[in-house]
Amino acid sequence: MKPRVAFFDFTGCEGCQLEVLNFNLEIVDLIGAVDIVEFREASSDHSDDYDIAFIEGSQTTDRDVERVQKIREKAKILVALGACSCTGGVNALKNRFSMEENLKVVYGDSAKLYSTIPTRPTSAYVKVDVQIHGCPPNRNEVISLVKCLLTGKKFEQCHNPVCVECKLAENICAFERGEFCLGPITRGGCNAVCVTGGRKCWGCRALVDEPNVNSEKEILKKYGLTMDDMMLQFKLFNGALEVSK
Amino acid sequence: MVMQLTAKQSIHLPRTAELIRVEKLSDREKVFEFKFDDGKELGQKPGQFVEVSIFGVGEAPISVTSSPTHKGSFELAVRATGGVTNKLHTLDKGAKVGIRGPYGNGFPLDTLKGKDILFVAGGIGLFPLRSLINYVMDKRSDFGEVNTLFGCRSPQERLFIGQLAEWDKSKDMCFLETVDRVPDDEWKGNVGVITTLFPKISFDPKKTYAIVVGPPIMYRFVIAECLKKGLADDHIIMSLERRMKCGVGKCGHCQINGLYCCQEGPVFTYAQVKSLKEAV
Amino acid sequence: MQNRVISRKDLASFVDDLIKTKSAGEVIGIKAQGNKFNFGPLASAAELRLDYDISLLPPKKYFFPQTETVLKYEVGKTPKVEAVAAEKPLCIIGVHPFDIRGLLLFDAVYGGKEPDPNYFLKRNKAIIIGVDCLSPNPKSFAASMGTNITEEGFDLMLTDLGGDYFVTVGTNKGHNLINKAKTREAGAPDLEKRDKVRKEAEKKYQVSLKMKKEEIPALLDATWESKLFKDRSETCFSCGSCVMVCPTCVCFDVQDEMALSLKGGERYRRWDGCMLTEFASVASGENFREHKEQRFRHRMYRKGKYLVERYKYLGCVGCGRCASACLAEIASPAETYNLLKEAK
Ligand SMILES: Cc1cc2nc3c(=O)[nH]c(=O)nc-3n(C[C@H](O)[C@H](O)[C@H](O)COP(=O)(O)OP(=O)(O)OC[C@H]3O[C@@H](n4cnc5c(N)ncnc54)[C@H](O)[C@@H]3O)c2cc1C
Ligand code: SF4
Ligand code: SF4
Ligand code: SF4
Ligand code: SF4
Ligand code: SF4
Ligand code: FES
């Protein structure tokens, strides 16, 4: 039987969803070896069986948490897809403001009627088997993962900082353009697309295994930037992660 | 520099071989017997290794565990630890893999000829060592006294049990084994780390070569024991493990200081290892 | 083989001719990329920037590409495997002497007992037109490594004499090639001028070794335990930039990738390097160079000792690319050796 693959939306940003739609098309068209079952409604979660569950977006309410726990029970393999699910992503920005403040901003005076919990990565609630980082996640990496799952090969995430792929792409280093870049402490696997596209790395794929955050700080200083500049950028995607001060 | 080459001479190109027998050794280890599709021999020396390919997954360096005295096929004994080795464990008889090699220097047969030998194997260190033990047993008259020590963590992790029993019974060698710990009381043998076997054997350090293969931490203790017994540095021979991606001295992964484990190794003397700061 | 002198204009038409006729293969040249330089396919001689300091990546990428497919296979009951390696005639214009020395080391590593067809099928066909480096990079120390000039490894070598270029002819291939251009025979005064230009360029190097390069192996022999390796590598990102940009770094990783059909796939190799955390780790969990200081030290030994002992060619040609690429400003072998010597 073909493995059944399911995608579950939680709180995420548009980019991720678009990218996921593209994955679906590509995987269905080209592999034809998996069945994609997509769930939009929480109620239909238990109506079917699935082998591989992709969790996209972060869990921001108690209901989300319950839902992701139910999915975990059913799925043989649970994949956190994208920065939001892996690290909390942009959603985790709200951790930096108090919860009450958030509710007020979003719901105004009716805030009391709603509850919201701090945004944490999916792994804070359930066991995550594989993380596919990035905002949006790298399509080739998802395809590579599905191929691994189908052929029984172990999926390895990239252990190198973004700089490796950035050098292979023959880019001029962002620092040489007077900009600061989080590439040296960010997990690669994206082919350094942002630098190749003329920008810099924002750290959307979270920290490498042995990030030298202190050294990054030193270099920022050299370039006349402050830690706050960096933290702001880094928190944009990795808000829920603790970066050592 | 002009070198006339064709793609067919690619350093990456394996020959295909068929799996003709699989046997479970323990929970994590199996032995696989292969035959080349082109009918040729592997032609290895004891202690050499091959690169095994599972197409679509990758390659892994694995020692040949059978002796070259065994013709027509060869054996690889493998612990399931990652991509290639796990996949290998799912294969059945009839499956095809790719094989490159044999690579590496192998054990120094010329040096060992006519000498007494002390084999010391820890855990799956027995896999590479077995090729030489079987070789020596098949050409028994070429060698002097043979002592063999084998240690593993628990009775469940013993490997090639049938062969251990044969060696135990054999008059051609003195065989001792031990396990680190015993979870049940069925085990009647020695308990303790492998160095506890040393007082139970005697050998002439002048005529003896010790061949030691095991995990990195075992080396330190066993070498100290060998030295205590009076073995010279170049009479202690070991086989080292490193990450490998090519087997032919190109990829750089297997470097131990200035040496390449796949070229000058994997077999080194303690005299060599002593001068290599990164070896053990 | 008679050396020649060629005017700027005639050199341009010589190059344009090469591009048009493809008689020497695809023409690659040194070009501007932003405010840096890099090798790339040449559309016209006007793109050539023979006055450059260093290229982003060394020309090794043409013989040992960043990523290269080495096998194609079909899986199934009887897998079919085929090696992938093809000839590709190239003419590379503007290679500096130190990068030529880097290629000579590559020849030694990729040759030997088991030569690599993927490398040599491309390398053998290549024509190398070098150019002397007259405006060295501020981080370069090629003069100290004796690699600012080379007597071997090129078909033609250009030296900018101001108005004209001196053409040192290195091989018959080069001789036949330059014969097609409008040149004049080089005389003794031209040769004198070339040597003077080279001497002057040598003075422009801002970084130098405080020892003879032959003394580096012995220095390293005596300093394995030095605290400097730990101190200096404290800020290392393990980002691998220093080894990715290096003309003498030869290391690679090998990976398999299945096609989407899952019926087959390919095996490819990709640049890898000893400064990266996983380079020496094995499946059992052991990492033989676990700490960044061990990796940092290993690279310094590779460059200054291991490679030269193994292959007779220097493991560092002093181009300065690593030092330019290293954000932590620690990667320069020359600086490290100088500090080691001072600390001794
Ligand atoms: C000379 C030599 C002989 C060996 N003999 C045996 C043997 O007889 N039996 C046995 O079970 N194991 C042996 N090993 C260890 C075996 O090579 C590794 O367990 C195996 O490479 C793991 O590969 P993997 O793809 O399953 O694991 P992964 O973790 O998926 O490894 C990925 C890749 O990294 C490299 N790699 C990882 N670990 C090692 C390692 N320990 N050594 C070299 N490369 C590594 C390989 O290229 C491997 O394919 C030997 C290793 C060496 C160097
Ligand atoms: S631009 Fe960023 S990722 Fe690229 S090399 Fe520079 S620091 Fe590294
Ligand atoms: S370059 Fe940085 S920000 Fe861009 S995709 Fe890669 S990790 Fe994310
Ligand atoms: S080590 Fe640095 S200076 Fe030396 S050749 Fe490599 S990149 Fe150039
Ligand atoms: S310095 Fe490191 S990456 Fe470069 S060739 Fe040597 S071992 Fe390989
Ligand atoms: S020495 Fe510099 S370039 Fe090299 S890995 Fe360390 S930080 Fe990166
Ligand atoms: S395994 Fe590639 S150099 Fe030894």
Image: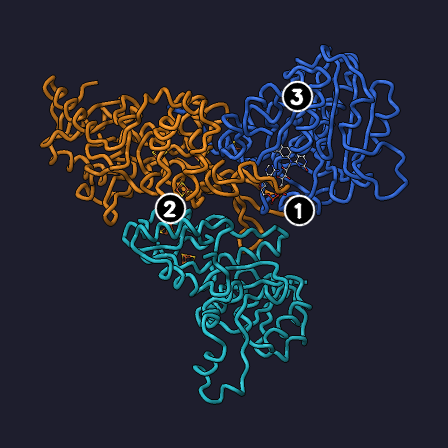
Chain colours: A cyan, B blue, C orange
User: Do tags 3 and 2 sit on the same chain?
Assistant: no
Q: Quadrant of residue A135?
A: bottom left
Circle 1: is it few (<14), some (14-19), or many (20+) Cα within 10 Å?
A: some
| Residue position marked by numbered label 2 in the rendering | A167
Q: Quadrant of residue A39?
A: bottom right
| Residue position marked by numbered label 1 in the rendering | B87
Mark 3 vs mark 2, foreground winner is: 3
**Disc marking residue B237:** 3
* Farthest front residue in view: C343
Q: Are marks 1 and 3 in contact (CB under 8 Å)?
A: no
Q: Is residue A53 left or right of residue C56?
A: right
Could you say whether the residue bearing mark 3 is in a helix, strand or loop? strand
Mark toward the start of the polypeptide (1 vs 3): 1
Screen quadrant of the N terminus of chain A: bottom right
* Mark 2 sits near ligand 2, with its Cβ under 8 Å away: yes
Amino acid type of the residue that numbered disc 1 sits on in the rendered structure: Lys
- CA distance separating discs 2 and 1: 33 Å
Mark 1 vs mark 3, foreground winner is: 3
- CA distance separating discs 1 and 3: 32 Å
Circle 3: is it few (<14), some (14-19), or many (20+) Cα within 10 Å?
A: many
The quarter of the image that holds ligand 6 is: top left
| Looking at the image, residue B22 lies above or below residue C197 | below
Query: Which residue appears at 47% of the width and 23% of the height?
Result: C112
Query: Which residue appears at 74% of the width and 17% of the height?
Result: B117
User: Do tags 2 and 1 sit on the same chain?
Assistant: no
> Of B72 and B260, which appears nearest the observer?
B260
